[in-house]
Amino acid sequence: MAVTPPDAPRWSAPRRPEDAPDLPYVDHWFHARAARTAAAPAWRKHVEPPAADVPRALSDAVEQVLRDTDEAAS
Amino acid sequence: MIAREQLEAFRPLSENLSAFLRPDSVHPRAGGPGDPRATHPLAYPDGPEPDPHGFLSDGAVPEDEDFRILAVIDDVLPLTHRTLQAADGASRIASVWLQGARAAPSRDPDAPGRDLPFGRELRGPAIDALRHAHTHGGTLDEEAMLRAAGLVDPGRGALHCGGRRARHGAAVTDLLAGAEPGDPLARCPVIGVGLAPEVVRDTLGTFAPYYILAATLHVLHRARRLCRWIEARRGWEAGRLAPPVVVNLSFGLTAGPKDGYGLVERFQDAVAREADRPGADPADRLGPVRFILPVGNHRLARCRAALRPRETVTWRVAPGDRTPSFAEIWGPPRSALPERPMQVALRLPGGAEMRTAFTAHGQRTDLEAPDGTSLATAYLSRASVGGTVRETITLALPPTDGSVPTAGPGGHGITLHADAPADLYVQRDDSVRAYASGGRQSHLDDGAYAPTDPSGRPRAHDPGTPGPVRRSGTVNAFACGRHQVRVGAVTEAGAEVPYSALPEGAPDGRDHAAVAERGVARRGVVARGLYAASAEAASGTSFAAPQVARALVADGGTIGPAALVRPWRAHREW
């Protein structure tokens, strides 16, 4: 059995993302945007990341329409 | 046709999408929440279209009921092309929504596009007026016209500067709708949406589905309004016109559920299935709506593997990649989630193998170096699929351009730990041309995959007993709906083009094929660029799809599955 060196990287304890929805790309996108925002001049900050719950709201809206459509068709 | 009240549920979508665009693209709200002129296509007023803002100039208004509506959703639309004009020079573009353009500075509350949340809408008469205003001594100053239209805007950065004359959407529109006067297709109006450059550049597809959905809503809404406007213009009773609508969407992703349950596929399926339902309100009448998509160009890109439990493949990440790299692992559909969640083990280049320890869906975990630096992130999600559920693990690696600490480029071993096989997809990381993001495409390797045969030619199909890395299952993730039309590429001689992607288990993987390469050594087909006098050799399934859409329109919606569709313009006509 392989022995893991003591200085090897390790997976952190699993956790729920608290500052972003559980959409992987969105999470990374927000992190990348946030990093850029920190380094951006003040005049640009107002264009930087939108509210974290927006993608979830969008996804929910689309799902609702599709559910309604499925019900109307059945 | 999908009902008006169902479209109304998209209001949160259109209201929130503007948050991702540049502020000068966003329309100032006419009022607060509840204002009927707020940011949704369905806030568009009922009743006759205000005549000063009609859809088409006189010469381009269809004279009879025998026409189709051609729609294109892409990055740009070529506004100046002669082949998109009627015989008298009037534009056949009835409406184009430039999503990323600066918001139009009109004070007219009824101006076209005031019901849109962002960007700018141009109608046929406005395009004609711009063309006349920028024609001097009989010569059109195209650059000035496109700047005035908001399509080219160098002051907003390289993404908005038009730049290259060869543009994806220009070639797609030309192949779909370009026609000389006298061609029956020249009677067909065009409705278009130019997606925001920020969305086109994002090859991860994070937000593209939402903008594509908003674009599709716009096409449906404007197509209905166009019909009612033509009826009023011709003195016909309301609801008389119900022309078929063909929508071309030449965009794609390499990773996704690929089971028909993605947002884009489900919505397009719902619209196609519900089209022209008997008993529709005359104000809502519209003919069948068909969505045409390319199968994709990634058959040989080694972006897909079929993994058995405890099987390992190598994920090779290129050096100098300026964007994160993503891979998705999709478990099979199940009636219930397994008792123990799916796990993966990741072996960094030259390092030990470390296995995730997810305990519940919706969790994330970071592969941390001893100093706390995150070298990779994994997400465990669940997706509902038609009464069943699928597990998904997404692996994300940081850029390898030196901007952040990483484990370095090279081979990352991925081992599946689950009680059932799973599909592994690497997400595309290269941008559409002219939108360079600095991404470099990663790929998979299993040691058994042979890209070429002994003579050096690319192997187009998997062997009888393939390894984990496959050519099948590489189809465009947006093109997995049951009612969409999938289009592959062939050469002028009808030979298979090896890059044309394949669905899982399908022999050729497409509903139709069109010529996208003149030959093995002569790439592409001739199509117009952004500027009217420019042309390019456009290569890829993106340019096969609009040709099939065009053939469907010309042949009344029926072409044989074995028919070979050829470009409307001979390749000699540069």
Image (cartoon, coloured by chain):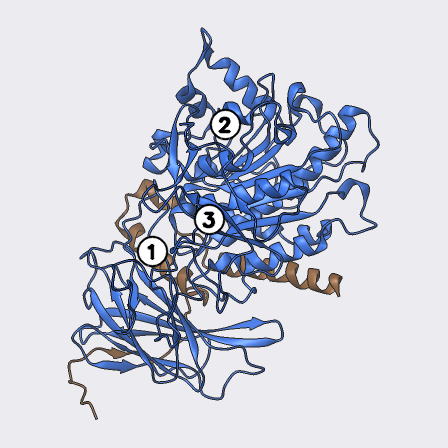
Q: Viewed as shown, does residue B124 lie left or right of B529?
A: right
Looking at the picture, does residue B204 appear above or below residue B365? Answer: above
Label 3 marks a residue whose chain is B
The quarter holding residue B573 reads: top left
Label count reads 3
Label 1 marks a residue whose chain is B
Q: In the structure shown, which secondary structural element does the residue marked by tag 3 occupy?
A: loop
Residue type of the residue flagged with mark 2: Leu
Q: Which residue is mark 2?
A: B79
Identify the mark at residue B494; answer none if there is no mark.
3
Q: In terms of depth relative to the viewer, which is nearer, B172 or B463? A: B463
Q: Nearer the viewer, mark 3 or mark 1?
A: 3
Residue type of the residue flagged with mark 3: Gly
Pinpoint residue B306: horizontal percent, then vertical percent: 40, 74
Contact? badges 2 and 3 (CB < 8 Å): no
N-terminal of the pair, mark 3 or mark 1, is 1
Write the residue at 50% across / 66% down.
B506
Q: Which residue is mark 1?
A: B429
Colour displayed for chain B in the image of the structure: blue
| Gap in angstroms between the C-alphas marked 2 and 3 | 33 Å
| Gap in angstroms between the C-alphas marked 3 and 1 | 30 Å
Chain depicted in brown: A
Looking at the picture, does residue B488 appear above or below residue B571? Answer: below
Write the residue at 30% across / 70% down.
B449
